[in-house]
Image (cartoon, rainbow, N blue to C red):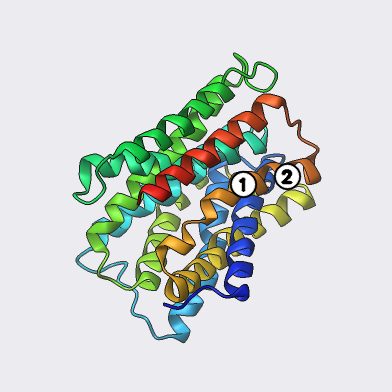
Amino acid sequence: MRQPKLLDYFLLTLLALIWASAFFNIKIATYSFGPVTIAFLRVFFGAIPVLLLCYIKKVKIEAFSKDWHWFAMIGFINLVAPFFLIAYGVQSVQSNLAAILMSTTPLSSTVLGHFYLKNEKFNFIKTVGILIGFAGIIFLFSDNILIDENNFLSALIILLGSTCYVVGGVLTLKISKKKNENVTGSILIWATIILIPLVSFIEQPWNLEPRLDSIISVIYLGLVSTGIAWLLRFKILVNNGLIFQSQVSYLIPIFGTILSYIFLRELITFKVLISLTAVVVGIYFVKKAR
């Protein structure tokens, strides 16, 4: 690993923009597609650049090896479930709220890590960060302009989606000795296999007449926000390490809020700004403690 250069900061910012852009694109995709279809198209198109890289680098894919059950389980928890839950929730809430709610993943992972990982125990600074971050989320739920009795459950469902990412990350430690390309390619294959019967029986997307902007958004979500973003993340990890790459967490909710306003003119209330600030500060303290 090397000291970060200007190019490294550019790539980190680009990764944050790509991941943040997923939220308003999910909103556009929901104009024509159901949440199961969105999840399926994301993993299908997302698998293309990853599997292509594995082919070029001659990385063996072990999706159907003796560890297939781990790949299938992680594919469901880390891809199928959160992709579905986020798309389902975004149908009823603004995409900028989804960006803020999903940014709680580093906070949730810290809580879960305290109970399941020996080197991730709470300390004073971590505890302060977690309390500040989740206080911001609780404050966000008090914004009756954007979250009311009609979409309160949808906001909770998005939070559940962020928790799935955390659980999936812990499970991935079970196969952490395998190549990242192999793991990602294998879980994408299993996520696709799981979603094929679900999308066929539940939503039958071949009967739809989708809008052009929705089609563009789901393709973007798969190829760019899922596939290319993973490859970019892997490059940053190899060059600069996990601590540098984890700084993307600060930028995603900020960029997500800005992009949702630019492309969808979504409302940004005072409580949204306060909540956003609290979450970013909370993540900062958690990262500082590590």
Residue 157 position in % (x across, y down):
49, 30
Q: Is residue 213 above or below residue 230?
A: above
> Which one is in front in this view, the residue at disc 2 or the one at disc 1?
2
Residue 280 position in % (x across, y down):
54, 41
Dot 1 lies on which element?
A: helix
Residue 144 position in % (x across, y down):
65, 16
Q: Is residue 21 left or right of residue 54?
A: right
- Image point 26% across, 48% down: which residue? 120
Residue 240 position in % (x across, y down):
46, 72
Q: Is residue 221 left or right of residue 122?
A: right
- Dot 2 surroundings within 10 Å: few (below 14), some, or many (20 or more)? some
Q: Is residue 204 above or below residue 242?
A: above
Q: Which of the numbered marks, if any, corresponds to residue 12? A: none
Q: Considering only order in the chain, which callout, 1 or 2, is on the residue closer to the N terminus?
A: 1
Residue closer to the observer: 206 or 64: 64
| Quarter location, residue 221 | bottom right
Q: Which residue is mark 1?
A: 205
Rounded to the nearest angstrom, the CA distance separating label 2 from label 1 is 31 Å
Residue closer to the observer: 75 or 93: 93
Q: In the orientation shown, which residue stands out farthest toward the front?
A: 124
Q: Using the rendered image of the protein, determine whether residue 283 is visible from the camera's viewpoint.
A: yes
Mark 2 near mark 1, Cβ–Cβ under 8 Å?
no
Q: Which residue is mark 2?
A: 258
Q: Amino acid at mark 2?
A: Ile
Residue closer to the observer: 269 or 148: 269
